[in-house]
Amino acid sequence: MRIMIAYDNSRNSRKALDATIAMFKPLDPLIMLIGVVEGSLDTSDASSELFSQQRAEFQGFLREAAERVGQAGLNADVILAEGDARKMILKAAEHKKPDLLVIARHSNEPDGGFISRSLNLLVDELDYMTFGSVSAFLARRAPCPVLIQACP
Amino acid sequence: MKVADVFKWKNPEIRALHLTWIAFYITFFVWFGMAPLASSMLKSLDWLTPDDIKLFAIANVALTIPARIIVGMALDRWGPRRVFSVLLVVMALPALFFAFGDSRVQLLVSRLVLSSIGASFVVGIHMTAMWFKPKDIGFAEGFYAGWGNFGSAAAAMSLPAIAIHIFGGPEGWRWAIASSALIMAAYGVYYWFAISDGPPGTVHHKPKKASAMEVSTWADMIKLILWTIPMVGVLGILVWRIEDMGYLSATGATVCYVVIALVVLYQIIQILRVNVPILKKGVPEDDKYPFNSVAALNSTYFANFGAELAVVSMLPMFFELTWGLTPTTAGIIAASFAFVNLVARPMGGLVSDRLGNRRFVMLAYMFGIGVGFLMMGLMSEKWPLLVAVAVTVACSVFVQGAEGATFGIIPSIKRRITGQISGMAGAYGNVGAVCYLTLYTFVSPSQFFMIIAAGAFISFALCFVWLKEPEGAFSEEYYVSSVDRELEALRQQEVTIK
């Protein structure tokens, strides 16, 4: 049993990881953590070191997650990719052929006042209506069963 | 980063973003302050001809390219805050000089010098990059560029009204330009004290600057040289026009040609000096990047930003003469072209990010520009004004969206030289403007729009053949077994016991 989990250290992805471990532990699966560092969209060379900083930080998160998997007594495989999150997770799934792909539903903790909250909601809604989220993209295209973890 | 975040004035990075786009907006306001006042100038100065105005429009975008190179060097030395402030204050001088110029040569020279102000784009992009986290930079830079470019629309909307209704009289246009120049200088002083280069504690260490772009193969080096020649070489066209119109003696023109040739030669030598050692050693397969993508993006920026600069320079007068409007109304209507910048340019970047196929987005936008300008080329006084405005706005949504899409692809070609790639593409925007505006001196507005449409279709074809979809990469993979973990934990325990 090989389970691939898309992990970005958001609140929801942490919950999804815990939930998945709890659910599938009896099957003793190999947990494949895939993390994608979104390429920086900076068009100047002013802050290239900021990007490498961010990348190192992200590697740290993945390492922590792998440790959590290890503490649960499961083996972990860690994959770090750079680029578009949707495409890279899809590529990894096609390449690694896991038995199950787990994605957390996207999380945006609402904050700010009423006006900015409603503005964000509107923009998000348009965004998902037109382009879909990472989970929607993968649910339509992944070569294996997809489990979308709801994270209350 | 969320859209609503731009209202959080208290956040230092949001404050920096607002301060910076306003500075950029003011530079665009001053830069394109001549077009909406052109007809007022013609009315009040009997020695000025429409041909002169067309020439000033070319001069107005000419020296931006060399200025970008100089500003790039200054940025590495002094950082964006100082460079932006100095640029705002210094560029107020040619603007004032233009406002009170009373001969053709004075007006031409001051416009030429003032064209350096276009380099402000790079400064603000740098400033924005220093303040934001890598994942927010795309949005912040798109916001900055879109809202700053909007300055040209604001100029078209407000300057005629200021000249006619506030100052009035035949000298009104002079005072309108002068007042915008003074505001710019004042803001430059304010900017110096209001902002810092990045959050407190940012260490500004100079990037290793190569003097030319690296390439991956010998063929790419030849292409790079070919694409470098027009960047400064295009100024030859301007010199030829200036001499043709009797501003410059044959000797003067020859001197200019020689200087331009020397600069181009210097750039080529730099390319060889940087790349020959690299290519002799051989570039590892995984470090190669296709220069064709860079060339394709140069062409798109030529065809979209170049078109925008050119159209913004002629549109107010076109509306005024075609539909017989007052300068104020024509200015407001012509501003509809640049007005959508507020939304269209950031949207172009967003669509490119979200759709998951940047190449397709770029192609679609270029095709849209072609169709849009074909429609504009068919416009005449028989069209209802409202329809003409609608076509103008629709066309401009594609033009500015394409700018956003171009800058959406640039960072994913080759991270190490992103700054140089975006500098080259940006310069090609000005090359486009110079080429288009030069052609404009020979043709009618309708033919002019058709030429721009042709440029967009050519760029579409180049993208279709050359532009590759940027690919992500798997950078590392490792395996952690739970047994490893237990052994590791045991070892740790032993160490602590000892």
Image: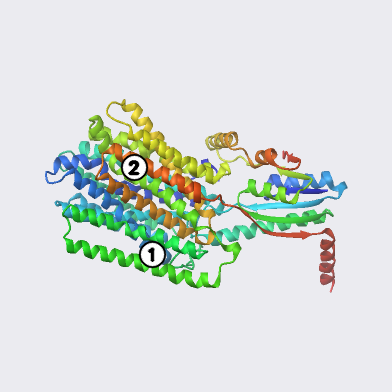
> Disc number at residue B74?
1
Could you say where residue B191 lies in the image, as x and y percent from the top left? 37, 55
Q: Residue at x 30, y 35 (%)?
A: B332
Quarter residue A82 falls in: bottom right
Q: Is residue B356 left or right of residue A32?
A: left
- Please indicate whether residue B102 sits to the left or right of residue B447 in the image: left
Q: Position of residue B205 (x, y in %)?
A: 49, 67
Frontmost residue, B269 versus B389? B269
Badge 2: chain ID: B
Dot 1: within a 10 Å radius of its alpha carbon, few (fewer than 14), some, or many (20 or more) residues? some
Residue B158: where, in percent of width, then height?
29, 39
Tell me the number on the disc at residue B451. 2
Place of residue B16 in the rendered image (x, y in percent of width and height, measured from the top left): 45, 52
Label 1 to label 2: alpha-carbon separation: 37 Å
- Work out whether residue A147 or residue B198 is closer to the camera in this orientation and state it: A147
Residue A20 visible in rendering: yes
Residue type of the residue flagged with mark 2: Ile
Q: Nearer the viewer, residue B187 or B229?
A: B229
Residue B14 visible to the viewer: no
Q: Name the kind of residue labelled 1 in the image.
A: Ala
**Who's the residue at 56% across and 49% down the image?**
B469
